[in-house]
Image (tube, rainbow, N blue to C red):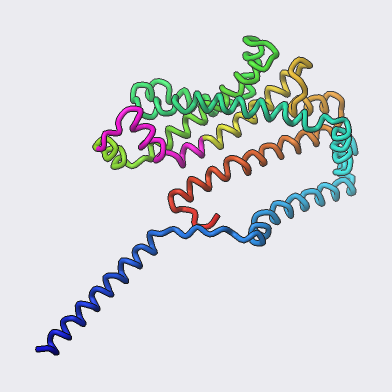
Amino acid sequence: MASTDTTTAGKGTDKADDLAGLEAGLDALDAVQVNRTPVREVLLHKVLPPLAAVALVLVAWQLLVWAEVTEDYKLPAPSAVWDSVSDMWLKGTLFEVIWTSVSRGLLGFLLALAIGTPLGLVVARVKFVRAAIGPILSGLQSLPSVAWVPPAVIWLGLNDKMMFAVILLGAVPSIANGLVSGVDQVPPLFLRAGRTLGATGLKGAWHIVMPAALPGYVAGLKQGWAFSWRSLMAAEIIASSPDLGLGLGQLLENGRNNADMPGVFLAIVLILIVGIAIDLLIFSPLERWVLRSRGLLVRS
């Protein structure tokens, strides 16, 4: 009898141990291990490749100059562009020119964000509004932003208001459409669960719709910034005026007017650097945070 009890107790203990092991395994699967990437690996896999690409472009550029594929005034050497950078640095105008454009671009993007977000929510959630202006937003998104510069100049004159109007017309449709796309991908179960818990109206939009639509929304924000920056450059190139100050677009246009190809290449490089820097400093961390919060990014 004692032997039977001992055997039964042993089996019960084994089952309890198996159950505990199973629970521990499930917990391990559910837990997302977030480990910091070593600095050496970051340098090797994230910093070194773009630096190597830049070095390769500079080498190819210099080889083309040495091969004299075209005249010097059409294709300046990298050293000539560097001389232009040094000249602006010594004059103290380099950061001033960059900040003029960056401040306009960021402020215009924030205005577009404030307008495009509620507009996207309304279009996504109200069928009549979507049927009415949804195709218009898609059409505006495909319209080149440079097309808005002439009417904006006529309506508002050569001032910062004209610049912001062009940025808004270029960026708002992208932000709104990005949010609409994100809302369309929200599982209906989330919405029903939110209504069951009393999250309706603005509360449901804030606590259910926006968090679930965040990946598509972030993609729309990235595209909206790209349109903001492109729109601003188009406006600064076409609507050059001393009253507007010297931005990167005006710098590019001045180089063209003066047949200063080193200045033209310098403006192009600075425009590219600003676009890359904003993406690396703002949107890439935001995108990683969204992925990490959903367990889609194990290592940062």
Of residues 283 and 293, the one nearer the viewer is 293
Q: Examine the structure image and report whether residue 218 is included in the region drawn in magenta.
A: yes
Q: Residue 14, relative to residue 79: is it above or below?
A: below
Q: Which corner quadrant of the image does residue 211 belong to? A: top left
Quadrant where the image shows the C terminus:
bottom right
Is 247 above or below relative to 17?
above
Residue at 60% x, 30% y: name it.
227
Q: Is residue 97 magenta?
A: no
Q: Is residue 114 left or right of residue 127?
A: right
Q: Residue at horizontal 76%, vertical 16%? A: 241
Magenta extent: 197-220
Residue plotted at (13% across, 84% down): 5
Q: Residue furthest front?
A: 2
Identify the main secondary structure in magenta: helix
The picture places residue 134, in percent across and down from the top left corner, at 42, 25
Q: Position of residue 76 (x, y in %)?
A: 87, 39
Nearer to the camera, 149 or 16: 16
Would you say 266 lies left or right of 18 here? right
Residue sitting at x 61%, y 29%: 228
Residue 272, percent from left and from top: 71, 38
Question: Closest to the observer: 225 or 285?
Answer: 285
Labels in figure, total: 0
Which residue sits furthest left?
1
| 84 sits to left or right of 203 | right
Q: Quadrant of the N terminus?
A: bottom left
- Expressed as whole percent of the image width and height from the top left, the position of residue 185 reads 38, 40
